[in-house]
Image (spheres, helix red, strand yellow):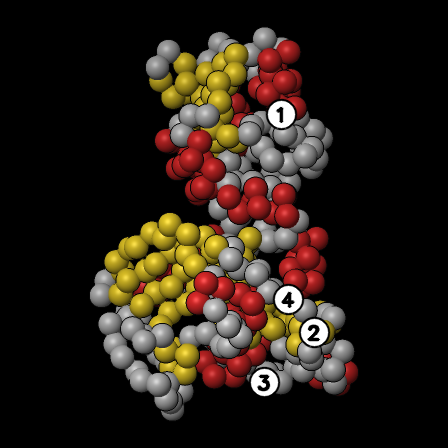
Amino acid sequence: MRRAVALAERALGRTSPNPAVGAVVVKAGRVVGEGWTRPVGGPHAEVVALRRAGARARGATLYVTLEPCAHFGRTPPCADAVVAAGVARVVAAVGDPNPRVRGRGFRRLARAGVAVTTGVLAEEAAGVSAWFRHFVVRRRPFVILKLAASLDGRIATAAGESRWITGAAARRWVHELRNRVDAVMVGSGTVRADDPSLRCRLRGGRDPLRIVIDGRLRMPIDATVVRQRSAAATIVATTAAAPTRRRRSFAAAGVEVIVMPAIDGKVDLAALLRVLATRGIVSVLVEGGGDLAAAMVHARLVDRLAVVTAPVLLGSDARPMLGALGLRRLGDGPRLDRPVVVPLGSDVLRDGRVAY
């Protein structure tokens, strides 16, 4: 099962809206087939592993990180493939929360005489499928907010200098995260100040969908996210207040412009996440700036918070990592739930779920 979990991690960011799953076929104590879910439309992990096992799958045990599906989607049911292969036993880490599956896969296997064991390394496997589980239950993407700041919570000097507050190890960690999420999101202020590419610079990595929040389309038409070509598209979410001429200019430059409802003149972020969900976007990494970060937290749309702190002080005249939240009581402040603390070179990462 540990091997299956490791295989599932390889599929993160490449299977949406399907879950990232790993599978291993074992016979007489030997691995005879293994695999992970292929991009949407391709075979699921169980099918990949069974194909590699071939005739050796008969009488074997299949270890899988998530309950095999039992419905027809873009591909036939995996539970039927398991039965057809003659597998004697299935060991599954966790059940599938998708209402179309939830328990049906296990029941299909049991009716066919396949022994089923569940709960093996459930916590580890659930960690890999957490984004998918959130997506199918809440019908919106899982949102990770990444903040990188000085010890006193500043993201740039008073003059606007921000490269680089954190070191090389922290920056590599960010690119590893970009390689796994479906989309990365920033505000137009970040585009104007830093002109980021929002690409993944890991060898063999892939770029996430790039999303810019710009209620009035004030970002420059020659910004890097507009002119730099990538296999991933760029979307600008704006409001009806954006001039029609500007919308046409961005569309002509190859950017998809989505006009969203406005709240106090700004893009309705909850509505935007619902639109992204309809497109099969399971995970979104929000990278800044401070106003967008605060808006996401204030709307209780952030599910996981990752804060990288650098060992430097910038002072009260520097730019804060988070905009105003309007809190009146200390107890109202969102907190990290059981944060994991990880050193990244000379920087420190605090990473955990957000408790509102």
Crowd band around label 3 with a 10 angstrom C-alpha radius: few (<14), some (14–19), many (20+): some
Q: Quadrant of residue 230?
A: bottom right
* Residue behind mark 3: 220
Q: Earlier in the sequence, mark 2 or mark 4?
A: 2
* Residue behind mark 4: 269
Which residue appears at 42% of the width and 25% of the height? Answer: 120
Q: Earlier in the sequence, mark 3 or mark 4?
A: 3
Kindly indicate whether the residue at mark 1 contacts the one at mark 3 (C-beta within 8 angstroms).
no
Which residue appears at 49% of the width and 77% of the height? Answer: 323
Horizontal side, residue 260 vs residue 314: left or right: right
Q: Earlier in the sequence, mark 2 or mark 3?
A: 3
Marks 2, 3: nearer the viewer: 2
* Residue behind mark 1: 103
Which residue appears at 62% of the width and 77% of the height? Answer: 214
Kindly indicate whether the residue at mark 3 contacts the one at mark 2 (C-beta within 8 angstroms).
no
* Residue behind mark 2: 263
Q: Earlier in the sequence, mark 3 or mark 1?
A: 1
Amino acid type at circle 2 is Ile
Q: Which SS class for mark 4?
A: helix
Q: Earlier in the sequence, mark 1 or mark 4?
A: 1
Q: Earlier in the sequence, mark 2 or mark 1?
A: 1
Q: Which SS class for mark 1?
A: loop
Amino acid type at circle 3 is Pro
Task: Measure the alpha-carbon separation of dots 3 and 1.
Answer: 51 Å
Amino acid type at circle 1 is Gly
Q: Which SS class for mark 3?
A: loop
Residue 245 x/y as whole percent: 75, 85
